[in-house]
Amino acid sequence: MHTTLETEHLILRPPELGDEVPLNNLICRSKESLKPWLPWAHDTRISTTLQFVGHAVEQWDSSKQTNFPMVIFHKEDACLIGCSGFNEKSNPSVPLYEPGYWLDTRYTGRGLATEFTTALTRYAFGKLNAKRVQLSIQANNTRSINVAKRCGFELEATLRNACVDTLTGEAADVSVFACFDTKNLPAHQARWT
């Protein structure tokens, strides 16, 4: 089941072979802002990015899909600007979906994360019949927490010492934001094929 999502400014689609070079360029350019939150951002080798893209292609072609990675394109600028999709914490048998995301630092602060998170949430409820969409965010990641709040997600719990801070190696708290329907989502619309 290959899916493409389209919003006002963005197109999200499954990764394809050939995406690894532009994706790796983004990771290298944005690594300092990604490292505090994403362990994989410490490894910027092209071979690692190629492995991610290959695994993503396999996931989308699998009947036992466990995650749903997507690359994000900015329509007006016609370029790849980040990754999102539903991560490995998703469980289609519930059905529960958890968006994960990151953007090229040149595209942060423009409301784009709110736009595509809203689109993924609408898709989860509208197409995948989700009962729950959640965001698990390291408790000191204020930018991602602000995205969750702007999308109308409710803080459900703060889990103490639930992850490892990728910079310090110390235990860190995780805030879990949840959404159970589309009524509190922003007005951003999404189409999918």
Image (tube, grey):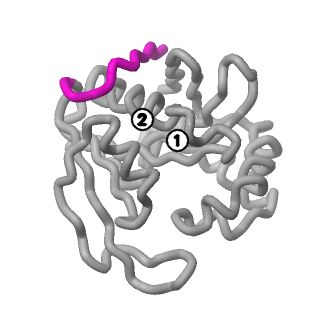
Label pair 1/2, CB-CB below 8 angstroms: yes
Camera-near label (1 vs 2) is 2
Query: Residue 121 in magenta?
Result: no
Query: Residue 187 in magenta?
Result: yes
Q: Residue at x 18, y 61 (%)?
A: 157
CA distance for labels 1 and 2: 8 Å
* Residue 88, horizontal then vertical, whole percent: 42, 54
Depicted 75 relative to depicted 185: above or below: above
Q: Residue at x 52, y 15 (%)?
A: 8
Residue 61 seen in render? no
Residue 29 seen in render? yes
The residue under label 2 is: 117
Q: Disc 1 residue type?
A: Ser
The residue under label 1 is: 84
Depicted 107 relative to depicted 136: above or below: above
Q: Disc 2 residue type?
A: Thr
